[in-house]
Each structure stands twice: as C-alpha cells, then as structure tokens.
Image (cartoon, rainbow, N blue to C red):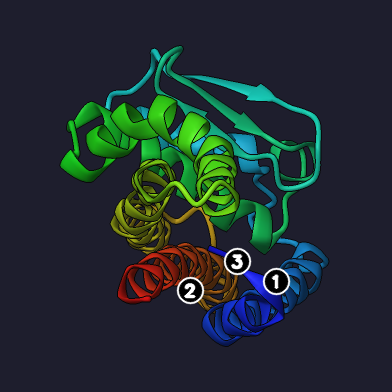
Amino acid sequence: MNIGFGGYGLYLLFSLPALLLGFWAQIKVKGAIQKFSKIRTITGYSGSDIARRMLDSYGLRDVKIEETRGFLSDHYDPRSKTLRLSPENFRGNSVAAAGIAAHEAGHALQHQEEYFPLKIRTAMVPSVQIGSWLGPIIFIGGMLLNWVDLAWVGVFLFGATAVFALVTLPVEFNASERAKAWLSTSGMIYQDENKGVKSVLDAAALTYVAGAIQAISTLLYYVFLLSGSRRR
C-alpha cells in the first residue's frame, strides 16, 4: 500500500481547491480587519464596552470580560463563562472591534440558551484534539505497514475533525447574526457602520467554510486511497 508520487498528486487534486479557498479567505478577513480597524465608531465605545452592554442586556452579568494576548485571539470560554478579547478589540473603538466583540458575546448567548450545535461542538473538543493529530499518524502508519484496518482507525479518528468543522459552521454563523441584529438596534454604533461590521464578520465566516471544506477534502482523500487499495 504505497502512497507514492501519484498519491501526492491525488492529494493535491482533493485538497488544492480547499487550500486556495482558505488562502483567499485569509486575505479577505485580514483585509476587512485592517480596513475597519482603522475606522473608529462615532459613539466611541470600545469592544469591551460593547460586549458588556450586549451581555448585560440579556441578563448575563455573571459573564466576565478579560483582555487576552495575541492577534485575533478573541474567544468565549463556556467552562469559566469568560469572554476574552485581544488587546486591539478589548480597548479599541473601531468598527472591527465592535463586530468581533459582539460576535463573541453571541457565543455567550448561545451558551445561556443551550444552543444545540454549540453543545455538540463543546462536547467534541477532547476527541477532536486527539483525532486531528493522531488520526493522520495512524492512517499513514497503516498505509506504510499495509495494515488496512489500522488505516481505517486513523480515518475514523480524523473524521471527528471533519464533523467538528461542519458543526462549527452554524455556531459561528448564528453568533454573527446575533451580533449584527443586536448592534443594528442597540444604538452602540451608527447604521452606516453596520456595513463594516457585516464585512468583517462575513469575511471571518468564510474562513470557517474553507476550514470545513479542507477537512472534508482530506477525509475523502483518505477514504479514496483505502477504497482503491482494497480494489487492488
């Protein structure tokens, strides 16, 4: 069961469209953030101000907001009920900061309402952390040892990564829609600034779509190789 040069060419055939989409998505999101990080909101509220107001408006006063290190390291931690914002979004009063902060607050609302896709994604985190790196190793080991059953174990482990990427899509889309809806009616930003928020969040959503397609493409490549080896 030899992967060989043809196998690498086949891998590119499966993965290249997803890789190109991912590259384009990264360009889009970086461009949108760079553009709208330079545009200050007229109201002057920082990202942490906006997140706090949004959380409080839904009765989530027990959710903490903290500043964290790293570029675009913004996230909501359901275990500690903490919303963490990168410095530029915690302190900044840009259109981009407003959108990203409200998006992360949207995840806290999902947690409060026990939004089903979020519950699934949270439950899958441990298995994905293992399967994302161990699955390919076991798959390649099975291929090199000509041990088909072992290779299939690797496929199933990596399959959790693909499922996780798919479940992530409604979670992220829903958080963005909550952010857009609240910002458009809260008075925290002006109506004209909503276009910038939409540009930032839509560009970020595209990166999740690209990630899901890439995970599925890799999974299909593994399955194709194993199915082909059995026919031989």
Q: Tell whether label 2 touches label 1 (CB within 8 Å).
A: no
Residue type at the position of mark 1: Gln
- Please name the residue shown 76% across and 76% down the image: 31
Q: Is residue 60 left or right of residue 22?
A: left
Q: Is residue 213 left or right of residue 23?
A: left
Residue type at the position of mark 2: Gln
- Spatial distance from mark 2 to mark 3, Cα to Cα? 59 Å
Q: Nearer the viewer, residue 223 or 116?
A: 223
Q: Earlier in the sequence, mark 1 or mark 2?
A: 1
- Please name the residue shown 66% across and 84% down the image: 9
Q: Nearer the viewer, mark 3 or mark 1?
A: 3
Q: Is residue 155 visible?
A: no
The quarter of the rendered structure image containing the C terminus is bottom left
- Spatial distance from mark 3 to mark 1, Cα to Cα? 34 Å
Q: Position of residue 162 (x, y in %)?
A: 39, 55
- Spatial distance from mark 1 to mark 2, Cα to Cα? 27 Å
**Residue 120 falls in image quadrant:** top left
Q: Nearer the viewer, residue 56 or 97?
A: 97
Residue type at the position of mark 3: Asn
Q: Which mark is residue 191?
A: 2
- Please name the residue shown 52% across and 42% down the image: 132
Q: Which mark is residue 2?
A: 3
Q: Is residue 225 visible?
A: yes
Q: Position of residue 115 (x, y in %)?
A: 19, 39
Q: Nearer the viewer, residue 160 or 227?
A: 227
Residue hosting label 1: 26
Which secondary structure lies at badge 2? Answer: helix
